[in-house]
Image (spheres, rainbow, N blue to C red):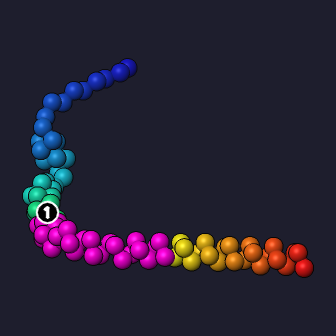
């Protein structure tokens, strides 16, 4: 025996029927707070500040990569010169 029950209701009505809390107002407050925080952080990050923040880090990365390459080639050269002797 197979029984199908079809209930047509809104999500709010289903939550009330099952006794679940309505989280809509809390979600709206949290999203509003997140939006306010994002706006304040975006306003504080003008393009010049972003440029100054990211450029030194990227330049350090380039310098470190160059140092790594120099160490690699110097070690390779020392190995090669050690084998010749």
Q: Position of residue 64 (x, y in %)?
A: 52, 76
- Per the image, the residue denoted by label 1 is 35
Question: Under tag 1, what secondary structure?
Answer: helix
Residue at image position (13%, 62%) is 35
Residue 27 visible (yes or no): yes
Task: Looking at this view, name the residue that lies furthest to the right.
Answer: 85
Q: Quadrant of the N terminus?
A: top left
Label 1: few (<14), some or many (≥20) within 10 Å?
Answer: few
Q: Position of residue 48 (x, y in %)?
A: 20, 72
* Left or right: where 53 falls relative to 59: left
* Left or right: where 48 falls relative to 75: left
Query: Camera-side residue: 59 or 11?
Result: 59
Q: Quadrant of residue 36?
A: bottom left
Q: Position of residue 54 (x, y in %)?
A: 32, 72
**Looking at the magenta stretch, what is its main secondary structure?**
helix
- The region drawn magenta spans 35-63
Q: Quadrant of the C terminus?
A: bottom right
* Left or right: where 22 falls relative to 73: left
Query: Camera-side residue: 2 or 10?
Result: 10
Residue at image position (27%, 71%) is 51
* Left or right: where 52 falls relative to 83: left
Residue at image position (47%, 72%) is 62
């Amino acid at each position: 025996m197979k029984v199908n029950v079809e209930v047509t209701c809104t999500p709010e009505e289903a939550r009330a029927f099952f006794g679940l809390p309505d989280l809509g107002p809390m979600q709206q407050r949290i999203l509003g707070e997140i939006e306010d925080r994002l706006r304040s952080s975006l306003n504080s990050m003008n393009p010049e500040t972003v440029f100054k923040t990211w450029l030194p880090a990227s330049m350090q990365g380039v310098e470190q990569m160059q140092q790594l390459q120099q160490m690699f080639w110097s070690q390779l050269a020392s190995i090669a010169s050690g084998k010749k002797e």
